[in-house]
Amino acid sequence: MNCDDARILLHGHLDGELDVVRDLEVERHLEGCPNCAREFATLRAMRTRLRDETFRFEAPAELKEKIRRALPQAPPRADGYASRRRGLVPRAIQFAIPLAIGAMLALFIAPGALRPNQNDLVAREVVASHVRSMMSSHLMDVASTDQHTVKPWFNGKLDFSPPVTDFAKDGFPLVGGRLDYIDDRPVAALVYQHGKHVINVFMWPSSSTTTSAERIQPEQGYNVEQLMVAGMNCWVVSDLNQPELKVFAELIRAHG
Amino acid sequence: MPDSSKDADFDRIFLPHMDAAYNLARWLVRDDHDAQDVVQDAYLRALRFAGGFRGGDPRAWILAIVRNTAFTWLKRNRGSNSPAEFDESMHHGGIVDAGLEADAVRSADAAMIREALDELSEEFREVIVMRDIEGLSYKEIADAADLPIGTVMSRLARARNKLALSIKGRVTREST
């Protein structure tokens, strides 16, 4: 592990968010690298300071009371605060206030603010899955450059058979496949390589026959292409640059 | 309108997180009165959208609404960047500083740490508040701050490195 990687992973190590393998790698790196060890000591000292109660603001009692009063009346409760609320504001108004404010807020808040559109959600999921596959050393369930090994591997694991083609002669060798879970269903993930870049291709059957007209925005430095191949919804994710990824996506489309 | 048993559920599920909600709002808008307004708005919005809560972590859910409300408020009142316009790459670099010392961080006044945190951009401040002060997991931060989970750690890394540098700068200035 080099220092650039370690400087990010130190944080996952500090927060107990790494898988066991990564965690050990970071620990080993810290043993041999005084610079990173010093940075880690600083981070740990800073976290100790920040955990002190002095940095946590507590909600003022008046705010708690205000919010409880503004919420619709709940049935009386054993702990007594509901009975405290009763009688402060006439019941009809208790219902009217949040409704009125809600209606006002609805004018201010874009409808999409709380619910991103489906495509964005899927884009986010495939990128997160791509990142996870790289981080957790769970890139492949079946490692093979042979499309005739990878394709049958999916049999019995999925209720569809994804098209699998090796594009080695075009500079995009197939390196394996795995099962993944996107958009609330099991999907096929094919792993390709281009130079040092790893490309994840996610496929699952789609009822719709067209792709969304929207261009998928890059997510956190990863490029994403969406296309339809042989009735499959197909998402391509990589840190590869966008024009090259587009070329790869076209290969898939042509062979689908 | 939700029936009264749902309202009781809402109370039971979300009222316990009012301190967490206020803490995040207070750090984001940096003013008691404004933070109270934000939390109150957020709770009323939460009530409206409670049907969209499908189980899971209620704290992350309410914090997501609090931070959206806070960012909307900041944009309207202070012309601050919305999170969508936040360009992470502009904040890259400057991580490596061999002079970061744990001792400086240990000896800093609470006021210095508070100032240093206040000076970070909101996007950096919120991940530190959620993780280090509020104790959320990366998954909860991803949900609350609407970030891909793969981004949480790298953003935390940049945020903490900036904060450590800033604290150390303050300690050094103080002692000269």
Image (spheres, coloured by chain):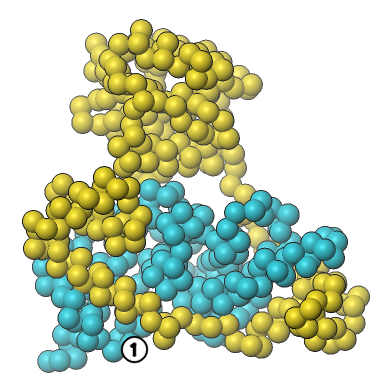
Chain colours: A yellow, B cyan
**Residue shown at 34% from the left, 34% from the top:** A138
Q: Quadrant of residue B89?
A: bottom left
Q: Quadrant of residue A133?
A: top left
Closer to the camera, A78 or A207?
A78
Asked whether residue A245 appears in the rendered view, the answer is no
In the displayed structure, would residue B17 be above or below residue A233?
below
Asked whether residue A142 appears in the rendered view, the answer is yes
**Residue shown at 66% from the left, 88% from the top:** A62
Closer to the camera, B41 or A44?
A44
Closer to the camera, B91 or A132?
A132
Position of A94 with respect to A156 (left or right) is right
Identify residue for label 1: B111
Position of A73 with respect to B108 (left or right) is right
**Residue shown at 28% from the left, 15% from the top:** A145
Give the quarter of the figure containing the C terminus of chain A: top left
Closer to the camera, A157 or B92?
A157
Residue B32 x %, y %: 54, 85
Label 1 sits on what residue type? Ala
Q: How crowded is mark 1: few (under 14 residues within 10 Å), some or many (20 or more)?
A: few
Mark 1 falls within which chain? B
In the displayed structure, would residue A28 be above or below residue B114?
above
In the displayed structure, would residue A6 be above or below residue A236?
below
Residue A170 x %, y %: 26, 14
Residue A32 x %, y %: 8, 56
Residue A151 x %, y %: 41, 12
